[in-house]
Amino acid sequence: MKMYCKVHQVALASKIVIGLVIMIITGVTISGVADAAVTFKGKTITFVVPVTPGGGFDTATRMLVPYLKKHLPGNPNVIVKNTPGGEWNIGINKMYRAKPDGRTVAILNMPGNAVSQVVGTAKFDLRKITWLGNISLVTYVTALSPKSGFRTLEDCQKAKEVVSGVVGLASTAGLGTIIAGDRMGITMKPIPHGGSSEAILGAIRGDLDWVQYPFTTLKKSSIDSTDLVPAWVFSRERLAQLPDVPTVAELGYEDLLDIVAMYRPVGAPPGLPEPIAKVWREAFWNATNDTEFQHMMRKVSRYVYPMTPEYTASMVDLVIIEVDKYKDLILKYRK
């Protein structure tokens, strides 16, 4: 994990990471002792995933479930409930409006899910969610179609138009794409797609010029093959797997690290009673720090980035502030 944290630093994370790193290095865990009276024995917990099965969020959730069962008192049954639709809002609302009894939680997408709150279409308040922690932090890569004729940032800046494939503005990928294009001085034309696989295939065919997705999503097409050309990475340091690809920091756009990085936090409904919240937070911390879970995630090229509930809540607050800076741009593309 230390190697991953070093390689995948982002500016937004650096604002909250100092205390987190101290806890990780010293081995400090969640403070307090779980309430022995709280047990989920014989209960069923619903873990809401607000997107369709098969993607990174679904995979991370399903891989975590056995370790939650291991660390939650009473070894409860935990079922994954995919609830897609409404740009994540249907699934988030299902969790948000559930009874605060510890039997419903959900995985979220930050900063993507902050869009609905910033533009005023959300029926929830991210700041009121009972945050349990974070599963992972994902680094993004911009890749260009070989058929586009573009190879560098300068090529894209000089182009009359750059066509990109996005999956909704409530996704971190879609939000990050339009913001990166605007900040880098690129005339962007985003084309909505049903999923990242569809957009990547479009770029391979030459229908699109640019795709911007997590490194793990683009690895097959930009490293394992030469179907796409990786152009830059959203990190401070170059990725070991892409040593010749510059970072946005090198290119002079370090501020983009505040917004183009994806967290996978997990939360429960507002008002979760403190004894139940304490049990959940301790179990979640232990599950995400379980060495077997981290090993299983690495085997599928996914990396765990545990955060305490306090740091998760701080991250959410900072993300909302950052996304709000681009409200006018977001509204422009939502029309």
Image (cartoon, rainbow, N blue to C red):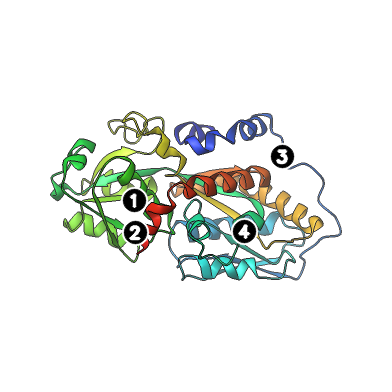
Residue at position x 72%, y 57% in the image: 72
Residue at position x 32%, y 45% in the image: 182
Give left or right: position of 148 versus 303. left
In depth, the one of 273 and 181 nearer the eye is 181
What secondary structure is marked by label 4? helix
- Give the spatial CA distance, label 2 vs label 4: 40 Å
Q: Earlier in the sequence, mark 1 or mark 2?
A: 1
Characterize the local packing of mark 4: few (<14), some (14-19) or many (20 or more) Cα atoms within 10 angstroms: some
In depth, the one of 116 and 214 nearer the eye is 116
Q: Say what amino acid the circle numbered 4 marks.
A: Pro
Look at the numbered discs 1 and 2 and tell me whether their residues touch, using CB distance below 8 Å: yes
Q: Earlier in the sequence, mark 3 or mark 1?
A: 3
What secondary structure is marked by label 3? loop
Q: Name the image quarter holding the C terminus.
A: bottom left
Characterize the local packing of mark 2: few (<14), some (14-19) or many (20 or more) Cα atoms within 10 angstroms: few
Residue at position x 18%, y 50% in the image: 161
- Give the spatial CA distance, label 1 vs label 2: 8 Å
Q: Say what amino acid the circle numbered 3 marks.
A: Thr
Q: Nearer the viewer, mark 1 or mark 2?
A: 2
- Circle 1 is placed at which residue position? 178
Residue 333's tag is 2
- Give the spatial CA distance, label 3 vs label 1: 38 Å
Residue 47's tag is none
| For residue 322, above or below residue 280 | above
Q: Name the image quarter holding the N terminus.
A: top right
Q: Nearer the viewer, mark 3 or mark 4?
A: 3
- Circle 4 is placed at which residue position? 66
